[in-house]
Image (tube, coloured by chain):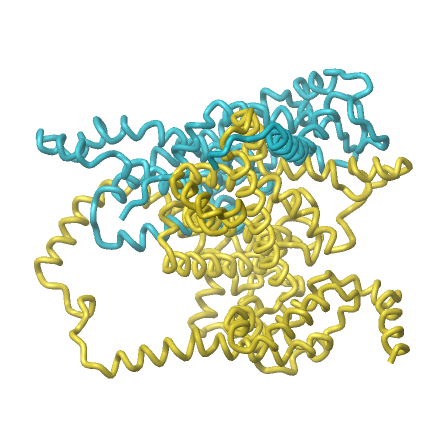
Amino acid sequence: MHRRMTFWQQVLYQAGFVLIGVFVLMPIWGMTYLAFEGGTIGWPTTFRLFPEEPTLAVFVRVWQQASQSLPFVRLLRNSLIVSGGAALLSVGFGASMAYAFAHFRFPGRQPGLFALLVGALLPPVALMTPLYMLLTITGLRTTLFGLTIVYTAFAMPFCVWNMRSAFQAVSTEVIEAARLDGASNLQTFLRISLPIAAPSIAVAALIAFLIGYSEFAMGWLFVEKSSNVTVAMAVSGALGISTFQGSLLAALALLMSIPVVILFLLLQRYLLERLLFVAPGD
Amino acid sequence: MSQSVGYHSGYSQSEQVADAGFPAWQQLVWLAQSVPWHPGVFVISADLLILVLGITGLPQLWRRKRVFALWFLIDFIFLLWWPTKWPQYVLTLTAPLCLSGAESLQAFVWLPVKNWWQQRLKPKPVPQWVRLPDRRALAESWRGMRKAWPWLLPGALVLTLIAFYPLIYQSAMSVTDFGSLSLRDGIQGGIWREAWGGLTGQIEPVDINPLDRASSTEVRYIGPAFLKILFSGGLSDLLVFNVLWTVLSIILQLAFGVTVAVLLHREGVKLKRFWQTLFILPWAIPEFIGALFWVRILDPERGWLAVANNPAASNAVSGFLDDPTKTLVLLLVAATWYGFPFIMLAATAGLKMVPTDVYEAAEIDGAGRWLQFRQITWPLLFPLVMPAVLIRAIFAFNQFYLFYAMQTDMPNLTFATLSYYLFAPGFLGGRFGLSAAVNVFTVVVLVIFILWFNRISKAAEGVTYA
């Protein structure tokens, strides 16, 4: 491992990375080029590597009319309401629970942790049928709030699980010191644990947000009014309609993923630290 | 002799075989179920059980009776490759499979039971958990509860309302024929009425084929008929595909991800950060968008590759792929693309923890690069990537958005996708009861799997975003 690389070894390695890079970029480029080509109806029938006349026309159209007659910003607003709402509800209702799981010993703790884990790993589809019925009964099904509840159900167990790890990672010495100074549980939680764990909680919230942001199948089941369509739903909808337009789909998909990609690249190191190796507890 | 071989190879290319349209792995499906010609004749079917036991017993068989293990492997590979996929062909596998099953029965069932029995015969102190908790322990747990409940209340309340109660409601749905026709009755409490009445014996189950579309406008109790089908390995083509899909996609992601991580870890490689950032991209793209990107490339009629190969490709609307084996390959490519960065990151983080002086020692001993990886890197790395792999496996088993975007059809479906198709409006849709039953099945499988892997490792503790 410590031998220096020869020139040819370096070339070989770089060539390998270029190949992997092509594999990684190929589908992304396939979509990007389609979006910039503009006006392609259906899938393109001729093979090109680059658009013939690059144009931003489709992006402009999507910006003004992403789905039906709704502008992109309106869809984005819907997306932000439902997935942001889901993230906030998950963190807001889950934080104290996560703290209890991290720091208190109480009967039923182990089964509770197990239930949380099962909840975090459930496929979204597994809650679809009953939630559809329950929201129909309560009359919330077609509202944005109804969809927010659905996404909260998907995201919350996972969010609580991760916040528990975040609280556990706060060193016990700090907490002990606060206790010695006469701080109550609530004070320790608000003044010490919460601020220290805040970055990890933010990451958990971000992931909860992304679960809702990229969800569309449940969206189409629950939403009826076209003014409540989210960005992800618009993308999947563009695939389904009879007057299918490749460029439109590509532009929408790009507009949807660009913010997420930027966010991930910016937070890269951070996400790795917080998400990959959480301090194992118990 | 040559005529008989010639006849069979000719037959395997015939239209009759091609029309059957079986996937390459079809023989696994035949192994997992009773012969399809006599539905309802067999009272119970142990085929699935024998298949599972047979596969788990293979390593043991390899050590103890290698001839039979070789028989099994060679025969099995041949059957995978040979185009004719008739059910009777698996008979050639029966002998080694049963021997292998016997090995695993001995190792995993008989020996533990025997040991347990011998342990029982020895007198032992009463274990801690049998003793009644004394007053002090009771008081302590009471104090713990009193301290914890205000903290738990908001979360527990919300989770019960939006996750646990729905799961119970769903179980009730799964024993009825609730469907789009009986929607109104279901909303007005028909599901609880029928499920409660049926389970307490007040209502006789209606005798209908659970797969038929319900024709009644009232919810009716049908008993756990469809659940029974699912748990006894009915729908075995789906079950086999789902497991095969999980195993193959996870192996590919692991192999590719670890390879890239090891390549990037090599000291002296230029542009390390650049490449790593580039390779993370698929992870940052929402799964179904990634799937759409790949549809754009791989669609057999309209995709980029198809157009490049055949400039005259029509722009006709194509549905799913016709060949399930090719579909599996396309799905695997997309899943590897989407999934490898996560494993790569986990492996990169793990490689940093492997001490370097071990390699120096190995180098002095003259160990080659592959030997170093095999003997040092992999054993140290494996436990570190294990949580990521297990979580990935669960996600693969439940994968839905990829299949939805690719618009695959039977048997290239996961149970989650089937459940969605049974629910959502469409050709299969509107059978809420059936969809609920599939979900109950998925949840039970998930619970068993998590229990099992919690036992074998504490990997569950490392569960994070995957």
Q: Which quarter of the picture shows residue B438?
A: bottom right
Q: Judging from the image, what is the letter of the chain drawn in cyan?
A: A
Q: Which quarter of the picture shows residue B65?
A: bottom right
Q: Residue at x 19, y 36 (%)?
A: A172
Please state which of residues A244 and B216 is positioned toward the viewer in this rendering.
Answer: A244
Q: Is residue A170 above or below residue B448?
A: above
B110 to the left or right of B1: left
Residue A268 coordinates in the image, percent (x, y): 47, 27
Please state which of residues A140 and A38 is positioned toward the viewer in this rendering.
Answer: A38
Residue A73 coordinates in the image, percent (x, y): 59, 20
Residue B231 coordinates in the image, percent (x, y): 53, 68
Q: How many badges with numbers are in the image? A: 0
Q: Is residue B319 above or below residue A62?
A: below
Q: Judging from the image, what is the letter of the chain drawn in yellow?
A: B
Please state which of residues B123 and B327 is positioned toward the viewer in this rendering.
Answer: B123
Q: Residue at x 44, y 61 (%)?
A: B448
Residue A111 coordinates in the image, percent (x, y): 31, 55
